[in-house]
Image (tube, helix red, strand yellow):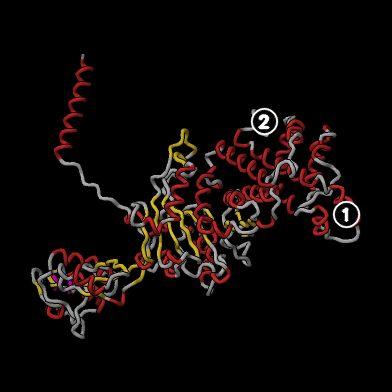
Amino acid sequence: MWQVADLLRGDYKPAEYRGVILPLLVLRRLDAVLEETKPKVLARAEQLKGVTDNPDVLLRDAAGVPFYNVSPLTFTKLLDSPNNLAQQLRAYIGAFSPGAAQVLEKYRFDEQITRLDDAGLLYLVLGKFADLELRPEVVPNHAMGYIFEELLRRFSELSNETAGEHFTPREVIRLFVNLLFGEDSDVLTGTAPVRSIYDPACGTGGMLNIADQYLTRLNPKARLEMFGQELNPETWAIARSDLLIQGQDPERIVLGNTLTADGHADKRFDYLLANPPFGVDWNKSKDAIVAESKQPGGRFSAGLPRVSDGSLLFLQQMIARMKPAEEGGSRVAIVFSGSPLFAGAAESGESNIRRWIIENDWLEGIVALPDQLFYNTGISTYVWIVTNRKRSEREGKVALVDARGEWSKMRKSLGDKRKYLDDAHIEEITRLYHDAPELAEADERVKVFDDDVFGFRRITVERPLRRRWTVTEETIEAVRSSKPVVALTVADDDARRTHDALLGALTDLLGTSEQTEAAFNKRLLNACTARKQIGLPPTIKKAVLSAAAVADPDAPIVTDKKGDPLPDPDLRDNVNVSLTEDVDEYVEREVLPHVPDAWIDHTKTKIGYEIPFTRFFYKYVPPRPLAEIDAELERVEAEIQQVLAGLKR
């Protein structure tokens, strides 16, 4: 099959090969699958002429698969008309059932037919595919899936500037699938189990296919029904093609925006996995998403993340598609950047989503992966495992696995991908996660925490307001430039007289200072009266008092009308206190020894959740001794001197 690339070379760039090879592979496979029942379908189509306007269901029954073709042509018969090949090929494609024809349409294969025909390559390329024996009894569905996956991998390597957008490295998917299915190995090896799996951002369908391959290896009698949704028409066509050539229902891969038009709103799934785009901006869909978030029980009712990163929206979508625990529950695996771990302050959208997940005890664990694993980003990534059916020993707990050191270096980089996971790494990471409850005390790469460790109270620590009121040159200038005072200069004559009297009074008070606001206010009004200005407008008085107020730690505490101390906004501080700790005990131990006059404003306390993964695994490395650093500097300096001496000679 790859020999077709040799025919295309010169007329096509390597990155363009997939536009020819993938749709023709799909076409040849569909033709081979339909070969045995083709006479029956043609006969049935003839019977139904004039009988029904919608023969689709009956023709699919005749074909025995979810698609059919009503043209008398076959792939090999097309070659009998080399002079009229392009027209015949278009007619043949147009005779497919609507679902299959739509897939080929999204490939925009009609453009390729014209291009191949103009280049004199159409007959040669079709001839190569006609020679392929792709009947199901020769190439089973799963083998066909492997072929399709291998071609996708090769095309992604040829076009690695865009590969990562729709193509997740296959070894990474294998790890995801291990983590997703690992807890259910006993159940999945039962008698012919049937399970469903869903990917809300399925791209080319690679995650779904590798999950299917995993289950087949585990139990050849098992069946995995695959569902997905994809926004990009071309990658949707590839994913749908993959289901077509494997004999699954292609209607299960829906084209559209998962966040605004959920294609599987009425379904619940056993397993869910996704690699949504990192930092996806959802501003274009904001109105619909915000509207749904306001609906009780809506997909996004737990909270909305920042518009610049919709990753957590996909996780909420997946949780909404989990089966209830009483119906067996579900398991979710999703890969994120580091942002969803901690972004957002207490009671922000992100924090509320994390709180909702953790307080419901759905977060089973998180695995930190090495950086530079993906084609389009070198950042560190994290796999979240979410489930509503935890094993008893995992209930109320979250496992964290640090697998950042499990990788091998690639011989040749592909985009940003410079590292990969070999079989040993995948096996080791899977073991660490599966055995996390037992390994937490024995392996430094594994930690298990109670759910409430990730929650905190965001408390507000207040200090009393201490001020004195003094008049300096800076005070007068600040009053002169304040908006209320500037406004007096452009108003009527009375306002201008007030302006002049005020600045004159402040000049008279230059150098004076008072310990209380009341005393300063009285002195200010007396000075204004002396300049024939009786009283001051409230806005003017406020501007003067604000400009004259100076922080003074030795000044008396400013109180309200009830005698309670007023807080100083400049000394206000916020502290996160773990939910596992009593706030009053924390303040007495950590705050009052340093600032005895502080207090907590409990009306401002907020609850937040974050997962500071890096902090949990941080290891302190003491700096090298100064003597060692000095010795190294002297050694390097001596080497430089030797090099310079050699240049002079």
- The circle drawn on residue 23 is none
In the image, taking residue 360 as reference, residue 274 lies left or right, namely right
Give 42 or 542, whichever is nearer the viewer: 42
Residue 27, horizontal then vertical, whole percent? 74, 43
Distance from the alpha carbon under mark 1 to that under mark 2: 38 Å
Query: Looking at the magenta stretch, what is its main secondary structure?
Result: helix
Is 515 colored magenta in this rendering? Answer: no
Q: Position of residue 598 (x, y in %)?
A: 19, 73
Residue, x 46% and y 33% (percent of image)? 411
- As drawn, is 645 to the left or to the right of 282? left
The amino acid marked with disc number 2 is Gln
Other-residue count near label 1 (Cα within 10 Å), few / some / many at <14 / 14–19 / ≥20: some
Q: Quadrant of residue 460?
A: bottom left
Q: Secondary structure at mark 2?
A: loop
The residue indicated by pointer 1 is: 44
Left or right of residue 110, residue 163 in this image:
left
What segment is highlighted magenta in the picture? Answer: 501-506
Residue at 71% across / 35% down in the picture? 115
- Closer to the camera in the image, 562 or 179: 179
Location of the C terminus by quadrant is top left
Label 2 crowd (10 A; few <14 / some 14-19 / many >=20): few
Q: Secondary structure at mark 1?
A: helix
Label 2, on which residue?
Answer: 3
Amino acid type, residue under disc 1 in the picture = Arg
Of pointers 1 and 2, the one earlier in the residue sequence: 2
